[in-house]
Image (tube, helix red, strand yellow):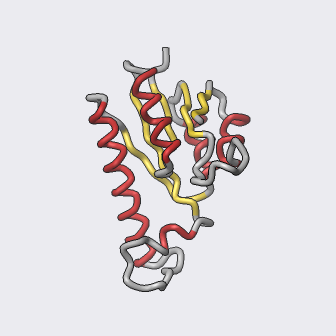
Amino acid sequence: MSRTVLVPVDGSPLSFDALRHAFREFPDAEIVAYHVVDLFRPDYGTLEDRDSTYEPMIGTAAWDRAVDNATDQLFTEVTDVADEYDRSVVTDSDIGDPKRLIVEYATVEDVDHVVIGSHGRLDERRPLYGSVTETVVRRVPVPVTVIR
């Protein structure tokens, strides 16, 4: 039986489906929602609530604030899902390459299982699995459940 289940979350519908699956299927496990801020995705510089098209440079105070705000909002949504199941959730985040950091987290931390969405894209016509999911499935040393 899994004691700690890692669920990578990126705000996509499938990452929340993965989180819900983890709460349902692992009722006695500690659920860890792990978010990796991908440096190569511009999402944090073009948040909808910004007044201009200015995109802050990575590492600037404005970029740091945008990342912190987006991560806080994501973890608020994660906590809301946990509340639906009357469960608690551990949240953690890093900045870097999601492929590398998710595999590293699952390898270094005491993780027994990973539940991950098949991709973070909103366009369903794209390939079935995203590159992050494919890397996680191939490289983590524990069982992986892919939600699609």
**Residue sitting nearer the eye, 3 or 47:** 47
Q: Residue at x 44, y 41 (%)?
A: 33
Position above or below: 144 against 75: above
- Picture residue at 38% right of the left edge, 71% below the top: 65
> Of residues 101 and 18, which is closer to you in this image?
18
Residue 139 location, x and y as percent?
A: 71, 36
Instruction: Give the percent coordinates (x, y) of residue 3.
Output: 45, 21
**How many numbered badges does the structure rendering display?**
0
Determine whether, in the image, residue 137 is placed left or right of residue 1. Answer: right
- x and y percent of residue 133 in the render? 65, 42
Rendered residue at 26%/29% (across/down): 86
Q: Is residue 138 above or below residue 78?
A: above
- The answer to which of 118 and 108 lies nearer the viewer is 118
Which part of the image, by quadrant, shows the C terminus? Answer: top right
Q: Where does residue 81 sit, x and y in percent of width and height? A: 34, 39
Relative to 110, 133 lies left or right: right
The residue sitting at 40% across, 27% down in the picture is 23
Give the residue furthest to the top.
1
Residue 73 quadrant: bottom left
